Amino acid sequence: MNPINWWSRISALFTKEFYFELNASWHRRKFSLSSFRSSWYSLAKAISITNQLENYGNQGDLIFYSYWLDEKAIALALLKKKFSNIQVISRAHGWDVYEERHPNSYLPYRHLLLDRLDSVFTISNNGKNYLSGTYPGKTRKIKLSRLGTMPLQGILQKRNGECYQIVSISSVIPLKRVDKILDLVSSIKNDNIHWTHIGDGPDFEKIKNQALEKSKTNSNFSFNMLGHVPNSELRDLLTKEYFDLFINLSETEGIPVTIMEAQSAGIPVLATNVGGTSEIVNTQNGFLVEKDFTSESTLTIISNFLSSDETEKQQKRNASFENWRQNYNATSNYSQFVEILTNLNSHSS
């Protein structure tokens, strides 16, 4: 999409939606200079997008779909006002759902979105319950539709080396707390721990240097920070390497696609109990720890698991894969989503 032009910025200041949003933020005690800017910017960007979509509004009964509940979804809400015959829907994940993740706990135009969109599909029950509880009058529009990942081929069933392999996948940003993952994996007492991290970000070099220092003082710890890896290469790695455990210690989440990827390879998962993570990780397929976990207790969990017999480990691996197969297989989940969209279109005809 084109960058926001000045006409869109000026137009936003003269819309009913803008002043309704300012009034709503005031009554919810969320009005501030920051919320003013956010509501103005978001609407200006949405207007710019809407202007580019208008030519499609007259082309019959169409479904317009936004992957995020953000400015693009706001644009579809504006488009629906002009073309009542179209269907407009959006997915909703994590950062675009939970208001407390944002300055002043504010996300703009929530009422507008839930008023005008035909359906909002959350990726987790936690997100669905959050929106339904925050906006109880719009419950019927809020539906669950899980994401998924494609099946892997030829998963390794036995360790292909002497060391325990632990993997994490995320951006290297404060929210993901990769530094805490490093602190844990470098402190595990079991012999020969190798940590692989996939993903880059502004803190990548800092964490890599910290890992290097820890490997110098602990001969049993080694690591490989791969940085950004294309998805095709990531999937290839998950089939060729036997990882004993996947770790995610994020402060907030929706339902991480990276956990879906790990479970598709049958890897048990240790993760923080935030957002919708408890819907994908449980005691059968892994371990949930609290957001403010203690290192000592979490290290005990990891060490006990790595030291457990192969039967117990294989049970968790099987449960991890089964959870993916039943709930997060993209082949079935996206087929179901297409069927939902088909029904939406047929009902509008």
Image (spheres, rainbow, N blue to C red):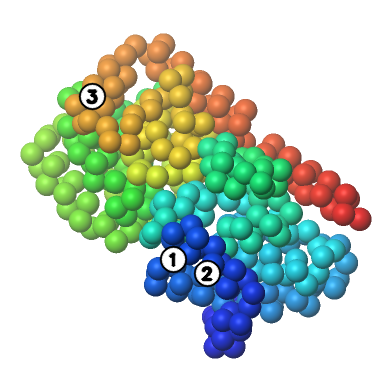
Amino acid type shown at disc 1: Phe
CA distance for labels 3 and 2: 47 Å
* Residue drawn where x is 12% and y is 47% of the image: 213
Do the numbered discs 2 and 1 sit on residues whose CB atoms are within 8 Å?
yes
Secondary structure at numbered mark 2: helix
- Examine the rendering and report whether any part of residue 49 can be seen: no
Which residue is denoted by mark 2 in the rendering? 22
Residue 52 figure quarter: bottom right
Query: Which of the two residues, 220 or 177, is positioned nearer the viewer here?
Result: 177
* Residue drawn where x is 20% and y is 23% of the image: 190
CA distance for labels 2 and 1: 7 Å
| Left or right relative to 59: residue 277 | left
Instruction: Spot the residue most to the front.
Output: 27
Coordinates of residue 122 in the picture (x, y in percent)? 60, 45
**On screen, 161 above or below 60?**
above
Residue 125 figure quarter: top right
